[in-house]
Image (cartoon, rainbow, N blue to C red):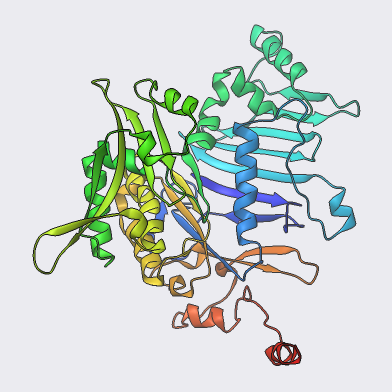
Amino acid sequence: MLVQFTVKNFLSFKEESSLNLLATSDAKHPLHLIPNKKKKSILRTAAVYGANGSGKSNLVKAIAFAKSFIVDGTRPDQRIPVTPFKLNEESRKSPSRFEFVINYQDTIYTYGFVVNESEVKEEWLFAIRNVQEVRLFERIARSNGKARIEFGPSLAKKKTKKHQFLSFIAEGTRPNELFLHELYQKNVKDVLPLINWFRAVLVIIDPESAYRDLIFDAYTNENFIQFMGIFLKNADTGIDSIVTEKIDPDFDKYFPEMPEKLKNDLLNIKPNVRVMLSTPEGRRYTLMREENGEIVLLWLKARHKLKTGGHVDMEIKYESDGTRRLMDLLPALLHSKSEERVYIIDEIDRSMHPLLSRMFLQAYLDDQKCGRGQIIITTHESNLLDRELLRRDEIWFTEKDEEGSTHLYSLSEYKVRPDLKLGKGYLDGRFGAIPFLGDFEKLQYCLKDR
């Protein structure tokens, strides 16, 4: 579970800003909470609102950058792709800061780093397994560019072989690389759960994301395809069910422009390997080798019932953008039932009707089988600003100041009457985070003048 994320001096975030998912004393919607033993409960969801350009997506980009830097690392000669706040001279020359507080597998991790485009200035990892917080390591860059890394006794006691091994890793850590990534590369078991959280638990879905295994899951998981069909039917998309179709991998027919070498490589894929393919027309396929050795090409179709009886199966590309977006989001609901996942969905309302966005979020919050999973969204949709749907501490806003710096704050910081319609209050500007529109008469004058 994500407990808190903090960012400073990255894109539009000049000052330190934190998204805190610890629950307040708000008694509304107690089933929205994940129990946290004797500590404060953790929220299952957060919704971040704000005007266009206010920094909502930059919050997601900050998390995405940190995840990529941790999991994928950098090449020896690569610039670290960090972008500081550019509207202030001092900030442009200063490093950026990122920190996560994570509760995973009965351990609370605090991990963060300070970085500019050429080197990691600081890095730290602490953990709470029982009651006491212990240091695993701390890193401070020296003036010569090499890092000084100190280990806590919980990671490695001095004068032990493990301490010597970790010292060797530290000595070889490049200035533009995280020590955590180096430990991961060297298979140091102490950090593997934390790395697994970033690799597999934290899932970031941007507005254009397509779920890569949608066709494969539908083909191999009967529960998934039934769940998707029922949800789409109840969402009044016009779809009665989803079906998979298996076709021969005729590349000349379906992919006439594909190079011969690539065709040959695909025809020799190994078992348990699947390849996602798409065409310029918008068709999506999955190529795989089945257990019997047969290579097949799979695609999805939407089944529509006819008033006269019977049905017709249509290609998914003919469905609306909103329906296709919903189909790519639905795996988040199903996977949350069986696995701990933290989904961060940027612009959940992209292409979707407001009622569909609400239905999706309501389905997640009403499902108590989702356990320790979380869904964090950014949105413009005021229809979701409803205390019958969300707690006050689940609602966050982004707003830029006169300097162009983003500030992140929670509705729980405001005293709000219980009977206040939050959506109307938001649109009326009670909580900020809405655009200040200019004089459209001047725009009309300019158009006439042309």
Q: Where on the picture, by quarter, is residue 402?
A: bottom right
Quarter holding the C terminus? Answer: bottom right
- Please name whichever residue, 242 or 30, is drawn nearer the observer in this view of the structure: 242
Q: Where on the picture, by quarter, is residue 79?
A: top right
Q: What's the residue at 30%, 39% (across, down)?
A: 298
Q: Taking 53 as reference, is 43 above or below it?
A: above
Residue 63 appears in view: yes
- Please name whichever residue, 140 or 71, is drawn nearer the observer in this view of the structure: 71
- Please name whichever residue, 366 or 406, is drawn nearer the observer in this view of the structure: 406
Number of numbered discs on residues: 0
Q: Is residue 374 left or right of residue 55?
A: left
Q: Is residue 143 left or right of residue 316?
A: right
Q: Taking 394 as reference, is 179 above or below it?
A: above
Q: What's the residue at 69%, 30% (across, down)?
A: 74
Q: Is residue 404 left or right of residue 423?
A: right
Give residue 204's position: percent from left, percent from top: 52, 47
Give residue 354's position: percent from left, percent from top: 41, 71
Residue 154 appears in view: no
Give residue 350's position: percent from left, percent from top: 48, 63
- Please name whichever residue, 16 or 267, is drawn nearer the observer in this view of the structure: 267
Q: What's the residue at 48%, 74% (across, down)?
A: 382
Q: Where on the picture, by quarter, is residue 171?
A: top right
Q: Taking 37 as reference, is 432 above or below it?
A: below
Give residue 335's position: percent from left, percent from top: 35, 43
Q: What's the residue at 58%, 18% (across, down)?
A: 188
